[in-house]
Image (cartoon, rainbow, N blue to C red):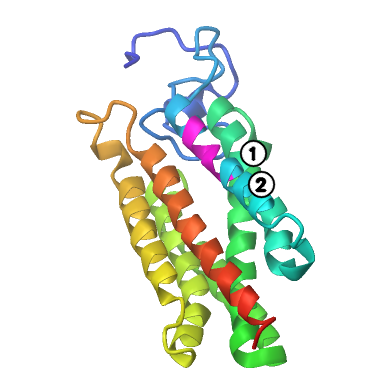
Amino acid sequence: MASNSETPAERPDWAFLANRGMADGGPRYTETPVDPFAPNARFVAEPWNTITAALFILLVGVWVWRLRGRYRDYPFLCCCLPILLAGGIGGTLYHATRTSFAFFLLDVVPISILGLAGAVFMAIRYWGRHGWWFVPGATAFYVGVNGLLFAALDPGQTLAVNLSYAALAIVVLTPIALVLVRTKFRHGGWIVAGVVAFVIAWCFRLVDRRVELMLPMGSHWLWHTFGAIATAFLIEYFYRVGGERKTD
């Protein structure tokens, strides 16, 4: 670990970095180097986080292959896969460099878009055309919660980000739960598995800075790993629900 006596890199953002903030706008993880801009910094800033962020790219590839020849039958999934791909690429580049605000946005924005899209898809499934009214309500809730979190907490702390992901999960799961009740829990096992995987992922995200003695690279990479597993289960559920719409 770098000592306080080291000569700081002569960069205008050194003070920001020294205060544990990051020039790319993202939080600092256990694996994050002290200064990604330093001449002696690793070529890949966060190796473990980078490799596991690429799992989402792999997931897109799996579903592009699986849906081959049937893309028109699954318009919702086909619209979501490019967004998921953008997020996977953004997350990989973000963790590999830790120097670009654009990569940070490309990592986090697609997640929010996909979460809201999934919620709207299930709301329409439950309420029909009236489900579009879920859009302003869900958006207002999510934006409002994020506004309160980042106003009340230091944006540089991971707690605000962690709670933001929890709020997004609530937005997504609310209409899904309503549909599951109406359909007598049909295909519900995929959602249960997804929720379990997400909770495990979220816990690993929470303890990233507390497990350094056991995991020198931290545990954020396990957030990616179990997050990808949760996403795979959720996509499988949407796939099965989408298939039902053609046979009902």
Question: Residue at the location (57% across, 31% down)?
Answer: 23
Q: Find the residue positioned furthest to the left.
A: 213
**In the rendered structure, does residue 112 fall within the stretch colored magenta?**
no
User: Circle 2: is it few (<14), some (14-19), or many (20+) Cα within 10 Å?
Assistant: some
Q: Is residue 23 visible?
A: yes
Whether residue 11 sits left or right of residue 220 in the image: it is right
- Can you say which quadrant of the picture contains the C terminus? bottom right
Between 75 and 244, which is closer to the camera in this rendering?
Answer: 244
Disc 2 is placed on an element classified as: helix
Between 76 and 43, which is closer to the camera in this rendering?
Answer: 76
Q: Position of residue 237 (x, y in %)?
A: 52, 69
Q: CA distance from mark 2 to mark 1?
A: 6 Å
- Residue located beneath label 2 in the image: 85
Instruction: Please state the total of marks drawn on the protein image.
Output: 2
Q: Is residue 186 above or below residue 128?
A: above
- Residue located beneath label 1 in the image: 89
Quadrant in the rendering for residue 218: top left
Quadrant in the rendering for residue 235: bottom right
Q: Is residue 146 above or below residue 220?
A: below
Quadrant in the rendering for residue 13: top right
Q: Position of residue 1 (x, y in %)?
A: 31, 16
Q: What is the span of residues highlighted in magenta in the rendered image?
A: 51-56
Q: Find the residue positioned furthest to the right.
A: 72
Q: Is residue 157 visible?
A: no
Q: Position of residue 158 (x, y in %)?
A: 40, 47
Question: Looking at numbered disc 1 in the image, what kind of residue is underneath it?
Answer: Ile
Q: Position of residue 194 (x, y in %)?
A: 41, 63
In contact (CB < 8 Å): disc 2 and disc 1: yes
Question: Residue at the location (60% across, 48% down)?
Answer: 62
Whether residue 57 sits left or right of residue 78 in the image: it is left
